[in-house]
Image (spheres, rainbow, N blue to C red):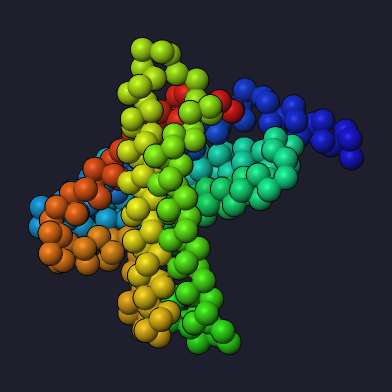
Amino acid sequence: MTSLTQTARRAHRSEPVQWGARSGLVARGLLWLVVGVLAANVALGGHDQADKSGALETLKDQPLGVPLLVVLAVAFAAHAGFRLLDAAVGEEGWKRLWQLGRALVYGFFAVSTVRLLVSGPSKENAAKPTARVMNWPAGRTLVGAVGVGIVVAGIVMAVRGVRQDFDDKIDVPRKRRTLVERIGMAGLVGRGLVYALVGAFLVDAAVRFDPQKAKGLDAALKTVAHQPFGAVLLWVAVAALLAFALWSFCEAAYRKL
């Protein structure tokens, strides 16, 4: 077991694994950059699907889109592998669970990308899986709990951005540090608030016992667009998504791994 642990630690510190981790952050940045552009088009009156699925489909439709998605899938999988090693040998205590959760998220990104390449886009919206879960015993409670969890996670992310809790995790040249810190603050606060919005729709669906109230990112943004001051709020969301994309690129360049 000691030998296995030592091997895992060497792999965790190895250059290929480190580059794989950074490639996953670049892939994340590209994905959220496209989501932000699609959301901007929605703000201008378009009907694009402004979420991760829509972003992947948009990339697939571009010249060399299929090879690009293959690269993204590999990058997401590589980052998931790095997080698994981090959970095994790089962190202690509850932080291991956090890294395991992040590994699952990036693994989901990888699987979603491969699924799009193999099977094409999914037409299922957020209401359909929510409806299925609500039909389970205690399903309504589960949906509400997931929604509350997403809201809390979004708020925690926003607070981390305001407090710049990421400051000790990046190694930035002094002349660029202030700019990178501002990008990190804007990106984490913005993404946190967008996540909290999606979670709030899930909670609303559970409280009203109406799966149609459950909305993914795309439907949530389009719902916001039809509210008073919706156009202003939607452009704020666009800025938040683009800021998080920029922060992903900054993390890829400067994060201590």
Q: Nearer the viewer, residue 22 or 110?
A: 22
Indicate the quadrant where residue 15 lies.
Answer: top right
Residue 108 locus on image (x, y percent): 52, 54
Residue 46 locus on image (x, y percent): 13, 57
Q: Is residue 251 above or below residue 111?
A: above
Q: Residue furthest left?
A: 45
Residue shown at 27%/66% (left/top)? Answer: 219
Residue shown at 36%/12% (left/top)? Answer: 175
Q: Is residue 126 above or below residue 117?
A: below
Q: Is residue 202 above or below residue 64?
A: below
- Looking at the rendering, in which quadrant would you find the C terminus? top right
Q: Nearer the viewer, residue 241 or 126?
A: 241
Residue 57 seen anywhere in this rendered image of the structure: no
- Relative horizontal placement of residue 32, taking residue 74 as reference (left or right): left
Residue shown at 45%/24% (left/top)? Answer: 253
Residue 204 locus on image (x, y percent): 37, 75
Residue 154 locus on image (x, y percent): 43, 54
- Looking at the rendering, in which quadrant would you find the N terminus? top right
Q: Nearer the viewer, residue 215 or 3?
A: 215
Indicate the quadrant where residue 6 lies.
Answer: top right
Count numbered badges in the picture: 0
Residue 232 seen anywhere in this rendered image of the structure: yes
Q: Nearer the viewer, residue 39 or 74?
A: 39
- Relative horizontal placement of residue 112, taking residue 185 as reference (left or right): right
Residue shown at 69%/38% (left/top)? Answer: 91
